[in-house]
Amino acid sequence: MLSATKIRAQQYDFPTQKASEGRAAIHDYPAMLHYLLVDDLLASFSKKEGIVYDPFCGSGVTIVQALKSQKRVIGTDINPLALLIAETRTLNVIPEKVELVLKKFKKSIHIAPADVPPVTNIEYWFKPDVIEHLGKIRALLLKHDDLPYSKFFKTVFSQTVRSVSNNRKGEFKRFRIDKDKLAFYNPNVWETFEQTALKYSQILSIPLPFREFQLFKHDLRQSLPFSEKVDLVITSPPYGDSKTTVAYGQFSSFSMEWLRGLNPYGDEDLKLDNKMLGGNKKQCQLPPSKSLEQTLNKIKDKKRSDEVKNFFSDLFISCANIVDKLSDSPTVCFVVGNRTVSGIIILMDEIIKEFFEYFGLKHFRTFIRKINNKRMPSLNSPTNLKGDTSPTMSDEYIVIMKD
């Protein structure tokens, strides 16, 4: 039963509009915020001269929509690939200049020596001809790093790597194409790179008139890397399932290996999931949340219970650092999902609410929206036992806190 402050909000379902439209269509990325939801939160809660902040900015949906609303915006994320995508989505691009670079590359591609970085199980995930041609494009990007729209072309390259890999299409996790289909799978690397660049250049040709933003590669368990006070937080944190349902590390690892030495936000090893919230096993104190305590008591599997505890301990520290940068009259909007662990539903919306109440904020509303266009199965196995399944998340909770 819903309370007076927990409201089913059908207006936020957006059943006919994909989350990956416009600038949000640039590069695949898992579990993106819906840009229309961000637009509504900006319209409802942003201040005229205020600063917007997305602590877990991912591929930059909040960043772009804030700039469209002519708001100053700051983003942080631990994933260097996400930050490269986010910055690329803010660019204003002239398609004719992109075409000139493509023509220059096309003349050189056949004589360019391939630069193939160390890639885990490369021959399993890429065909030999694909490896050769990706290496040639990578060599051109390294040689011409000062070309116009350098970050743009690196993002195009990253998407190309995903598109021509042996990974099943439409998957964020690593699942190889079926063997019988793989025999007939022969992607054209240059054509994929070229068409992706042309498509993205058209999207970015509609200019953003306002581009006052900052992006930082940062671990939120540490003090935040900027001095400004922020008036509105709009974010969707990890749900604590980065190794399973929303596997950011698995998703990013293809590109991060091929982008080694190219990404201005730095390189990252393949243990990104271990560096995310709750990724490291450690002893930690229970954060101040009655809902969390009750949930942990219900989870009989101690290993799984400790994983949940570690995640929320890290998230609590992150929330403390966020609160430290809030202005005198802020609004905080966290978009979360209530996943299942060992058959127990984790009431993340209630836990987040209790975290911020501990820091002195007041609960304003929690809106519930149906998740559409999901790239995850309708059933998963929360116990990892064959045949033991439960529904995956079908709703998102927009938890709104105010001072």
Image (cartoon, rainbow, N blue to C red):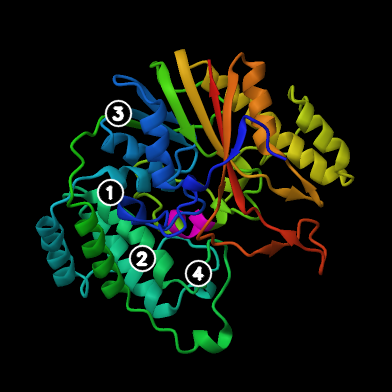
Marker disc for residue 122: 4
Three-letter code for the amino acid on which mark 3 is drawn: Lys
Can residue 118 be seen from the camera position used here? yes
Three-letter code for the amino acid on which mark 1 is drawn: Lys
- Decide whether residue 255 is among the magenta residues: yes
Marker disc for residue 151: 1
Q: Residue 223 at what x, y percent from top left? A: 52, 20
Whichever of labels 4 and 2 marks the residue nearer the N terminus, that label is 4
67 relative to 117, above or below: above
The boundaries of the magenta stretch are 251-256
Give the label, 1 or 4, closer to the camera.
1
Whichever of labels 3 and 4 marks the residue nearer the N terminus, that label is 3
Whichever of labels 1 and 2 marks the residue nearer the N terminus, that label is 1
Three-letter code for the amino acid on which mark 2 is drawn: Thr
Q: Residue 188 at what x, y percent from top left? A: 32, 78
Q: Secondary structure at mark 2?
A: helix
Label 3 Cα crowd, 10 Å radius (few <14 / some 14-19 / many 20+): many
In terms of depth relative to the viewer, which is nearer, 92 or 187? 92
Q: Is residue 238 left or right of residue 21?
A: right
Q: Secondary structure at mark 3?
A: loop
Q: Secondary structure at mark 4?
A: helix
Principal secondary structure, stretch drawn in magenta: helix
Is label 1 in contact with label 2 (beta carbons under 8 Å)? no
Q: Quadrant of residue 191?
A: bottom left
Write down the residue under mark 3.
Answer: 71
- Rendered-image quadrant of the N terminus: top right
Give the label, 3 or 4, closer to the camera.
3
Label 4 Cα crowd, 10 Å radius (few <14 / some 14-19 / many 20+): some
Whichever of labels 1 and 3 marks the residue nearer the N terminus, that label is 3
Q: Name the residue at 39% across, 56% down.
A: 20
Q: Is residue 187 left or right of residue 287?
A: left
Whichever of labels 1 and 4 marks the residue nearer the N terminus, that label is 4
